[in-house]
């Protein structure tokens, strides 16, 4: 990996995040929501991983992320959706992230122990 690749990855990911926030701030909630639903990080990452490591690496990573998403990201989103009106957005996000990281670490430990998706 060289510095020009890192710069390309950084700019590409940043453009997507900027687009999502700009759409939301301009009142384009539907477009912002649609852009947020696009799996931006995996989309960008899989193009680059596919170019450098090949299709098998992308496949293995996708399987790992799919299960990880169900285990940790879904509970995170449910916590944010449920808690935001009750304790405010920032506190709900913090609580959601705590839930996310606890579940993600448990998933990583189990997946590593049983050598899943290798």
Image (cartoon, rainbow, N blue to C red):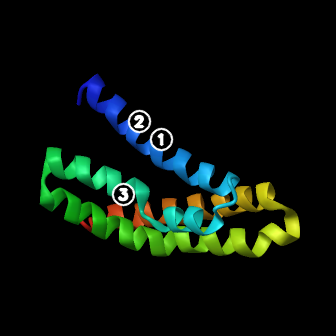
- Tell me whether the residue at label 1 lies in contact with that at label 3, contact meaning CB atoms closer than 8 angstroms: no
Residue beneath label 2, please?
Answer: 11
Classify the position of the C terminus by image quarter.
Answer: bottom left
Q: CA distance from mark 1 to mark 3?
A: 13 Å
Q: Residues within 10 Å of mark 3 (few under 14, many from 20)?
A: some
The residue tagged with tag 1: helix, strand or loop? Answer: helix
Q: Is residue 118 visible?
A: no
Query: On the rendered structure, is 61 left or right of 92?
Result: left
- The mark found on residue 42 in the picture is 3
Instruction: Give the answer, above or below, for where 40 lies relative to 30.
Output: above
Q: Residues within 10 Å of mark 1 (few under 14, many from 20)?
A: few
Earlier sequence position, callout 3 versus callout 2: 2
Q: Residues within 10 Å of mark 2 (few under 14, many from 20)?
A: few
Q: Residue at x 24, y 46 (%)?
A: 48
> Residue 117: x, y in percent?
25, 67
Q: CA distance from mark 3 to mark 2?
A: 15 Å
Classify the position of the N terminus by image quarter.
Answer: top left
- The mark found on residue 14 in the picture is 1
- The mark found on residue 60 in the picture is none
Q: Residue at x 34, y 57 (%)?
A: 43
> Residue 44: x, y in percent?
33, 51
- Tell me whether the residue at label 1 lies in contact with that at label 2, contact meaning CB atoms closer than 8 angstroms: yes
Earlier sequence position, callout 1 versus callout 3: 1
């Amino acid at each position: 990996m060289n510095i020009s690749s890192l710069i390309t990855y950084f700019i590409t990911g940043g453009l997507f995040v900027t687009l999502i926030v700009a759409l939301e701030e301009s009142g384009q909630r539907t477009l912002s929501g649609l852009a947020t639903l696009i799996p931006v990080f995996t989309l960008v990452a899989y193009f680059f991983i596919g170019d450098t490591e090949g299709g098998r690496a992308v496949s293995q990573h996708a399987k790992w992320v799919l299960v990880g998403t169900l285990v940790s990201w879904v509970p995170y989103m449910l916590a944010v959706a449920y808690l935001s009106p009750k304790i405010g957005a920032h506190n709900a996000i913090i609580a959601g992230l705590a839930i996310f990281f606890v579940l993600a670490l448990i998933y990583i430990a189990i997946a590593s122990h049983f050598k899943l998706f290798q």
